[in-house]
Amino acid sequence: MCADIDTEAENAHVQWAIQHKDDDIEAEQYSSTRLATNYSETPFVNDYSVNNIVGSTSQSDNSIFRICCIGAGYVGGPTCAVIASKCPNIHVTVVDVSAERIAAWNSDSLPIFEPALDEIVRKIRNHNLFFSTDTDKAIQEADLIFISVNTPTKSYGFGTGRAADLRYVEEAARQIAHIATNDKIVVEKSTVPVKACESIKTILKTNKRRGVNYQVLSNPEFLAEGSAIHDLLAPDRILIGGDETIEGSLAIKRLSWVYEHWIPKEKILTTNTWSSELSKLAANAFLAQRISSINSISAVCEATGASVDEVAKAVGLDSRIGSKFLNASIGFGGSCFQKDIYNLIYLAESLKLEPVAQYWLQVIKINDWQRERFAQMIVQNLFGSVSGKKIAIFGFAFKKDTADTRESSSIYVCRYLIAEGASLHIYDPKVSSDRIFLDLSEQIGTSERELSNHVQIANEPYEAAKNSHAIVVCTEWDEFMKLDYQLIYSTMEKPSYIFDGRLILDHDHLMSIGFNVFCIGKKPAKNPFSNQSPL
């Protein structure tokens, strides 16, 4: 039965590729290759080109494959930019309800920062990549629609602090059903809990117009902020989940065709919908687990005299484990890890799998503890008090090469230090002052005006460090490794301290200058160049 379904879907896919042969030259080459490779036993296909076959059909040669993406955020914007750049004759429109965000995408200052993103967008914007607030028009014209909206953790009602809030996904699905007058492939791109696609299908089915049919696919993103463009251009895999039906198989193949413009077919993995949805949650949970694992070992290292860098290297050389995501730090952040683990916890609790829920909850607890532990290290080594002391915070984004601050560990470290009465001077090369004040005011529960009594934003790191008692490295920006720390030391209060929460600085060099250096994963040693010993 599976072979029959696949064969029929393949044939249907060939007809679709033929009908869309004018989408672009790459599509034509792709279709010809598939015909020669997969249907070599069919003399008709071998003897005639796609152009000859199209000549005998009634399908218009002017059909253009169109994609609409609902949501112009961290996933939708970069994903569609790369699709449009690799598929020059596919018309891609990214829509959003925020006129301000769309205006930014259409300006010289994009709403998000990703290396190489600006260059791609500038090259193809208003050619085959468009940003618009006219969602209805984009939906109506599209053959395929990505849903790439925000799915935050619920802050109200049942599942508070655990379940994903899917109201924006539901709103998008209802809008599609209300507008669409012809068949659509709807692709869930947002990170969602298992069975979310089933909910989308139910909404579309019960609200659709007469004669309109939908296929709903799961196509989760596996992007790391700061390297999103690289991840899109050369992914480890593309995962597409859909119904195990003829129509579902055809929809999967149509989406695969888009990716196959630049991604080898062997890297495109197809599954059923549920496997695709769960794979996304599991992947992020596993990555976060590795970070919490090495961070738990960092505490042991500090207590024993071992070096977490040396331990991580020794462990990572085991081919069964590998070295990635074994960098000790002040904890993971970003929009995905914590949210996806909480989704997994909520799923396990809903399925009455309490040991599973508790297991994954510990990953988050270790992460929270690591942030608090680092803040305690700062206070304890500044003679037990930071009240009234100026502390320079280097980095506010949750990782380098991004302006995203969601769940950034820097927010939590700053919160603890503000509660202790510190005066913070924060520098980040990409995060705006408005964003910093908004994040801290939401986290602390105070107004931005009140917060300004404790927080100032610096335009460059030397300004932040001047007259400070300590520097706290919270984000691993490359520029922090290249600063003139001899000059910085000369402008600071004495004794001068550096707390390296990312293990990126040359600690021996800093101590030779005169700094007292404390970091994650190493037992603090007396500075041989200073009379000030650690507490």
Image: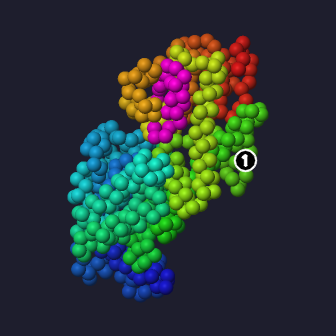
Q: Does residue 433 show up?
A: no
Image position, residue 375 (x, y; %): 59, 29
Going 76% across and 35% down the picture, which residue do you hit?
A: 306
Query: Is residue 529 shown left or right of residue 237?
Result: right
Going 72% across and 17% down the picture, which residue do you hit?
A: 533
- Tell me the SS state at disc 1: helix
Q: Does residue 166 show up?
A: yes
Give above or below for 513 relative to 111.
above
Going 26% across and 82% down the picture, which residue do you hit?
A: 56
Q: How many marks?
A: 1
Give above or below for 531 relative to 245.
above
Image position, residue 70 (x, y; %): 32, 55
Image position, residue 501 (x, y; %): 60, 32
Say which residue label 1 marks. 315
Asked if the magenta segment contains residue 322, the reply would be no
Report the amino acid beneath label 1.
Val
Taking depth in this image into account, of 521 and 372 the one nearest to the observer is 372
Q: Which residues are magenta?
A: 405-428
Taking depth in this image into account, of 411 and 39 the one nearest to the observer is 411
Q: Quadrant of residue 438?
A: top left
Query: Is residue 284 shown left or right of residue 155?
Result: right
Query: Is residue 137 shown left or right of residue 161?
Result: left
